[in-house]
Image (cartoon, helix red, strand yellow):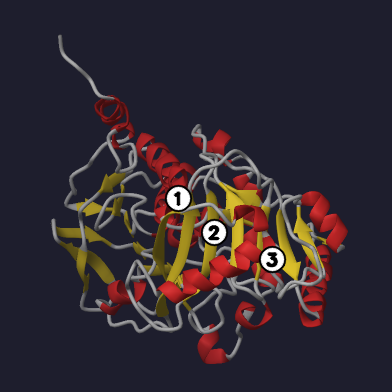
Amino acid sequence: MQKFSAWSLFKEAFGGHQGWKSQYRRATPKAEYDAIIVGGGGHGLGAAYYLAAEHGLTNIAVVEKGWIGGGNTGRNTTIIRSNYLFDESARLYDHSLKMWEDLSQVLNYNVMFSPRGVMMLAHTVHDMQVIKRHVHANRGNGVDNEWLSPEQAKEFCPILNVEQNIRYPVLGAALQRRGGTARHDTVAWGYARAADALGVDIIENCEVTGIRRDAQGAVEGIETTRGYIRSRKVGVSAAGHTSVVLGYAGIKLPLESFPLQALVSEPVKPIMPCVVMSNTIHAYMSQSDKGELVIGAGTDAYNSYTQRGGLHISAHTLESICELFPVVRRLKMLRNWGGIVDTTPDRSPIIAKTPVKGLYVNCGWGTGGFKATPGSAHVFAWTIANDEPHPINAPFTIERFRDGLLIDEAAAAAVAH
């Protein structure tokens, strides 16, 4: 009698650890495409899906140097919110949040969106002033946000410590009830399956090694580890490595890459009903569907492509988390990791045409990329298809750094993630 282990049955059913591969075709490159998307994460796969679903371009390839969802998409901490300060940011992130709400139905794939609420803590008078400013600005833009007293914050999240004798006492909080979480890698898999059904080729293990330009300087194709592929339209959405890929076309971007750390605890029964964030202590926490407490930290202080980061960041974060949530003190850490985030000087993204005809870029999200996935992919596809920006991403150009038209969420953010 043949014996089957639980792991062998799982691999047979779902294609192993690399994103349930059995659910979409593993394509080989054609000689030419109408458009190529570089980067097989949520943003890149989403852009390919919307190009096919809304703009009728089905001869499209997504090229990924590893496997889909194996980069930042599979390394983030799943938070979704739209309570950004500036008008341009609020429009972009709320466009995305509205798309999250029915994304599972659109893709016919459960992305596990859970609007459990995102609460941002204030620990100082300055925090209170800044966060209340966000509340008022959000309401002015039609984005839900409300101010809570410490007692109301405790009622919304019972395990939160609101005693005033701790190092970082909770003086109040802002709550966006529509915010929440989603399962990070399922977003990539859902877009992959939906794009595949529309005829998009998803080409894994295909690293871009060059960008070819014609005599007039326009894009004519990409060099890859699997050969040359022709296309007059190339969109680059390769988190953490966009500056490398754009460098092949002679474009320099105002980007820096940093490790952004996170960790999870051993799984426990449900104790965390929402997402709680604190910029002052650079920490936030939620609970996954598997029961793990998902804890995020800040970015490292130095540029790096490492996917680990410095231990002192995690140690500082855990000290603060244990003070805010004493009930978790005895839990064990299950694993920790780092994602590579590329950031612009104003910590707002670039979603735009480049100076090279036929070359488009979606990058610079810093810590904000996951929450923007559907909206970013949607407007990026519009930009590629129409060779002009959608009204929502029109302000997010490369030229804003030359012209001084910054969208400076770095200075204004109530929280860094």
> Label 1 is placed on what type of residue?
Gly
Mark 2 crowd level (few <14, some 14–19, many ≥20, 10 Å Cα) = many
State the SS at label 2.
Answer: strand
Query: Residue at label 1?
Result: 46
> Label 3 is placed on what type of residue?
Ala
**Residue 211 occupies quadrant:** bottom left
Query: Is 116 above or below relative to 352?
Result: above
Instruction: Please provide percent x and percent y for residue 331.
Output: 53, 52
In the rendered structure, the answer to whether residue 166 lies left or right of residue 44 reads right
User: Front-most of 30 and 298?
Assistant: 298
Instruction: Please provide percent x and percent y for residue 134.
Output: 77, 71
Query: Residue at label 2?
Result: 295
Residue at the far top: name it.
1
Instruction: Please provide percent x and percent y for residue 339.
Output: 40, 65
Mark 3 crowd level (few <14, some 14–19, many ≥20, 10 Å Cα) = many
Instruction: Please provide percent x and percent y for residue 307.
Output: 34, 66
In the rendered structure, the answer to whether residue 106 lies left or right of residue 52 reads right
- The disc at residue 90 is 3
Tag nearer the camera, 3 or 2: 2
> Label 2 is placed on what type of residue?
Ile
Residue at 51% x, 39% y is: 290
User: Front-most of 48 and 237?
Assistant: 237
Mark yes or no: residue 365 visible.
Answer: no
